[in-house]
Amino acid sequence: MLISALYLPGCKKGRSSGDNNLSMQPGNAAMGKNKSKNAIKAEKLVKFGWITGQLGKTEEAASYFKEAVKYDPSNADAHHGLGLAYAKLKYYEQAIPEFNEAIKRNPEFTDAYTNLGIAYISTGQEKLALEKFTIALKLKPNHGPTHKALGKYYYLNNNNQQAINHLLKAARVLEDDAEPHIVLAQIHMKNGLFHSAAPELQEVLMLSPKNEWALYSLAKVYHNSNNLNEATKIYRKLLKINKHHIKALENLGDIYFQKGKPEWAQAAYERAYSVEPSNQRLANKLSRITKFVKGQNK
């Protein structure tokens, strides 16, 4: 299983949000007034690492964390940050020892166990991954990032009930994170439970109003339920964000034709076809609707 399927977090410190980053908790950086100069220097470098990581400069962040480790090998945050940077760069084999070192320096570093578990999954070591997730939940039974990782893992392994259990727990804790709701919606839609998918998609849109996938999926839910008015509203909202969304244009054309508005349907199909003129299905629909409209106007 590829880590991209679970989406490994990036170097971001703070509360988890819709960008798929796990929340980062502090490790065991030296405390008190008796810090050595090296320890103080390492802490500053770790802060620089987080800042550059937040800006998307992952390689630069890695260099700061590496330097921090040199100054203070006992700094768990430095090892954890370096592990995250490596993982973000898809150097998973290099990330694993850094996460392990962070845990060695701070055996209660919950995020490090979770991220180590995700890294193990990316290298095909699922048994080890589940062991680390289990430890993380023993340390913090309501740890949202671990529940999210487990929910996604079980979803990708077709264990929907386990996936739902963990994702619901993740959603309760990670209030600003749309991802648990996205996966829950995917599970429900995959099983044809569109009425269950709708509230999850609405949650996604509350957190991320311009999420094109969620807008299209919610429109499809209403469309499949024959709630054409709501489907139309959401397709239109999506097209304000992405006027070239072919599927939204095509489905809107279908709705217009179903509602007895063939000229509107023709216009929608024409817009879709102009974006993708190689699409034979659209070409056929446009040809049929054009003939229909001409026949009506005779």
Image (cartoon, grey):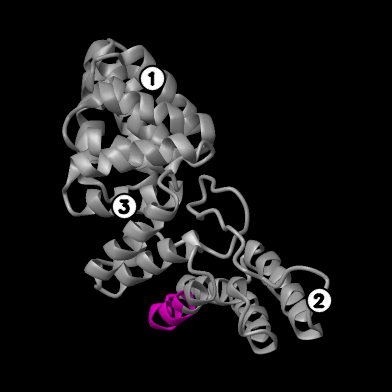
Q: Which of marks 1 and 2 is nearer the N terminus?
A: 2
Rendered-image quadrant of the C terminus: top left
Q: Earlier in the sequence, mark 3 or mark 1?
A: 3
Examine the rendered structure and indicate whether residue 145 appears above or below residue 254.
Answer: below
Left or right: residue 176 compared with residue 52: left
- What's the distance in space between the residues labelled 3 and 1, CA to CA? 36 Å
Q: Position of residue 204 (x, y in %)?
A: 45, 34
Label 2 neighbourhood size at 10 Å, few (<14), some (14-19), many (20+)?
Answer: few
Question: On residue 150, which mark appears?
Answer: 3
Which residue is pictured at 81% across the width and 84% down the height? 37
What residue did someone put label 1 on? Answer: 232
- Foreground mark, 3 or 1, reads 3
Left or right: residue 106 compared with residue 236: right
Give the secondary structure at mark 1. helix
Q: Where is residue 133 in the image (x, y as percent from the top left)?
A: 34, 59
- What's the distance in space between the residues labelled 2 and 3, CA to CA? 40 Å
Question: On residue 34, which mark appears?
Answer: 2
Front in this rendered view, residue 218 or 38: 38
- Foreground mark, 2 or 3, reads 2
Q: Where is residue 141 in the image (x, y as percent from the top left)?
A: 40, 46
Q: The magenta stretch spans which residues?
A: 90-100
Q: Which of marks 2 and 3 is nearer the N terminus?
A: 2
Q: Position of residue 282 (x, y in %)?
A: 25, 38
Which residue is pictured at 34% across the width and 41% down the height? 167
Give the secondary structure at mark 2. loop
- What's the distance in space between the residues labelled 1 and 2, CA to CA? 65 Å
Majority secondary structure in the magenta region: helix
